[in-house]
Structures are given as structure tokens and as C-alpha cells.
Image (cartoon, grey):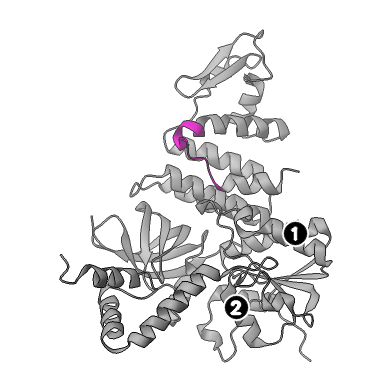
Amino acid sequence: MTARIEGQPAYVLHLRAYRDSSAIIDLFSRDYGYLSVVAKGLKSSSKSRQQWRAALQPGNLIQVSWQGRSELKTLVDAQLNSTFPLRGNALYCAFYINELLGRLLQPFDPQAEVFKLYGRSLLELSSGSRVEPILRSFELTLLTELGYGVDFSPIESAPEAYFIYDPEHGFCQVSASMDAHQKAFSGHLLQQLARAEWDADTLKVAKRLNRLILAPLLGDRPLNSRKLFLRQYSD
Amino acid sequence: MSNYSPLIDELIDALRCLPGVGPKSAQRISFQLLERNRGGAQRLSEALHNAVENVGHCRSCRTLTEDPECRLCRDPRRDQHTICVVESPADVLAFEQGGDYRGLYFVLMGRLSPIDGIGPEDIGIDRLVERVQALNVSELILATNPTVEGEATAFYIAEEMRRLGVAVSRIAHGVPLGGELEYVDSGTLSHALKGRQRFE
């Protein structure tokens, strides 16, 4: 692997303190995919570290240089490129998106389309649009790009039928006598979902479907950032 | 392989838990204490022991103290209807050195960090809500750090306070005194511009 990379565009996904004054930063770079760098002396009061601290906030787009031969790289420089004014609920959503990426992306696997998708989603979140359609589109596109996409073709010919989703076999048509309200998805709603026509019903279906697809990928470690929503918006 | 006796090794190893102290410094400190300053070492060991045994959290504001309630919370001259929420006990000290603030504090001992699994229960939000209700607080000042996690924490608390009908303010972000604009990062400058005040 190349020893030194200069001026790579990257999004900051997460920052955690490391040793006394350093931090480990998870980045999603355009050409090298997901990687972690250590920012040495980040808490120092020098000018360059103050700039780093401002640049290395989650959600920021930065120009980053790193070096090193091991998997954990050493940060050489970080310049702020753009920052998204995320507030409140949109900020919680950005945490969720960042955590999801951190869990699903493979290190050093470039994902140019996901990179664009991420920037687009943050822009939409910062514009104050409704968050649910943004999140559901993000999840569906992310899954497709990473090769876990859903095959909607069984639904096309049978909008009136009901389907269940199985992570291994995809959509399977079920008889109408089966308890349709519990587990099965309506073909009609799935068609709308495939066309990204969002309303209250399709958003609910998308949420349930995405959870089903994500569950085996996330394993037995649930996403932490969901808990914040649950607590603040449960009542 | 170490060349020292077990007790000295243990001391050197233990000293490395101090911030900024690596193996070499730990060794230097150990020998300094043992060779030249046994009295100081005795004092350090007693102070450390006493502090670790006795210092806990203030039942009102969660800051570090050996009393059930800290000095600031007990002080009747402090304004009992204003609470300033900060991330760490060091932040309380920073405000107190400024000397302008006369209200009470609430120390979160951290900040929300959803990805690391640090949630509202870990930073004592329930306690804060209880306190605000008990004191009939009229203003809650959010002084969490101007980081993404600090902002998320501020927003979370603001939402909780909105339900209680308590007025919430956020400390201003801006240009440091004696600073030069050309060296200030663009994010800070745009905050400073947005938060500008009438010049009188």
C-alpha cells in the first residue's frame, strides 16, 4: 500500500480520543474508501492543531493527507473543505448514517457512488427536509451499492399479492390467507417503494424492510445511534 | 526484561497511567522520588489515597467533591434559578476563574456520543431534569463544547427543557480576544457573524 497520500477528499465519520492528547478518526475517503487515521497531539493548542480540531468534526468534508504502512494511518494534514449546518434531529440522523457506514464499509474498499450518496444525503439533511425519506433512500441505495440490494422483480407482475422478505431468498409471494398485517408486505406498496414514492405507508414499509435486510449484516450488535431517537421521540 | 526489583517496576508501571508520562519519564519520576524526595513521595501517596477513597460526585451538580454536596451548590449567595450545563469539572473551574457567572452548574461528566454508545442516562440527564424542577429554574445555559457531539448534547437537553417550559440559552461562539481574524477558522467566523450584536 502506498506510503503517503496527499490532499484526498474525505468525510469525517467519527472521532474518538486516543491516549493523552491524540484521537483516532474514522474517514470515508473518495478514492480509498473507509479508513482510520490517528491525529497526534490533537489537543495541543498550536495553530495547526486548532485547525485540525475544527476540520475533524463528524460530517465535515475535508482534504486530508496521511502516511504509514499499517492499517491505521497517521494524519499528516487536514483542511476543512465544507461543513454542513446540521442541527437537532438532522444531526442525530447524521450520527446514524455515520454509524451505519462505519459498520458496513470495508476498509480500503473505494465506494465512489456511496461517497456521492453520503454528500447528497448530508446536504438534504442540512436543508431541513423531512428526515425519513432521506434515511430510507440512503439505506436502500447503500445496500444496493454494497451488493445487498433487493430484487424487486418478483413484485412487478403481482401488485395485488402479498410478499414476505427472506434475507436468503428475497421476496416470496404468500397466499392472501396468511396474516397479511403482521409480516407480509403489500406488493402495491413495495412497487411504490421501488420507485421511491414516499408517503407515510411506504416509509413504514421501507423502515421495516431495511431493518430486515440490515439485521444479518449488523449481527448481534445493535446500532447505538438509534437509541437516541427512541428515547427522545418515543412519547 | 526489567532490571529493577518488583516494587520499583510496579511503581514505574503505575506512574504510566498519568497523562503525558511514558516509560522513560515514569522511570525518572520513580528515581527522583526514591532517591531525593521520600517526603514528597509519602505526601503524594497519601494525597492520592485520600482523594481516591473520598472524592465522589456532588449529589446536586455531579461535579467532583468529597462532600455530599459541593461548595458551589451549598453557597446561598449563588443565583438558584440559573443553571449552567458543562461537560467537565474543568469547565466549571474555567467559568469560576472568569468570575462573571453567579448561578449554579450542572456537570455532565461527558457528552452524548451516540456511536460510542454514550447516551442520555450516562450523562445524568434525568438528574438534571429533577434538579431544574426542584429549583424552579428560570434559565438554563448550555455551555457544552462547540463540537458536533457537544451540539448534539445541547440540542438534546434543549428538547427536554422545552417540555418543562424552561428558557434555554447557548453560549456564544466567536473570535477569541486578542485573536486575528485571518487566522480564525471559517466555521468560527460564520458563527461569530451570525451571533453579532448591536454595537453600543
What residue is pinned by disc 1? B129
> Quarter of the image containing the N terminus of chain B?
bottom left
Residue A128 point in image, percent of width and height? 68, 54
Q: Is residue A151 magenta?
A: no
The amino acid type of the residue labelled 1 equals: Val
Q: Secondary structure at mark 1?
A: helix
The crowding category of the residue bearing disc 2, from other C-alpha atoms within 10 Å (few below 14, some 14 to 19, many at least 20), is: some
The percent position of residue A134, horizontal first and vertical second, equals 61, 44
**Relative to B41, is A13 above or below?**
above
- Which image quarter is the C terminus of chain B in? bottom right
**Which residue is painted at 42% across and 56% down in the image?**
A26
Res A6 seen here:
no
Magenta stretch in the rendered image: A214-224
Chain letter of disc 2? B
Residue B41 in view of the camera: yes
In the drawing, does residue A224 fall left or right of residue B46? right
The reply, left or right, for residue A93 in relation to residue A35 is right
Report the chain holding disc 1. Answer: B
Quote the CA–CA distance across marks 1 and 2. 33 Å
Mark 1: few/some/many CA within 10 Å (<14, 14-19, 20+): some
Q: Which residue in the structure is indicated by mark 2? A: B189
In the image, which is nearer the foreground, mark 1 or mark 2?
Answer: 1
Tell me what residue is drawn at x 53 percent, y 77 percent.
B185
The quadrant where residue A23 appears: bottom left
SS category of the residue bearing label 2: helix
In the figure, residue A48 lies in which quadrant?
bottom left
Locate residue A149, reporting x and y percent: 47, 31
Of residue A62 and residue A166, the one placed in the foreground of this image is A166
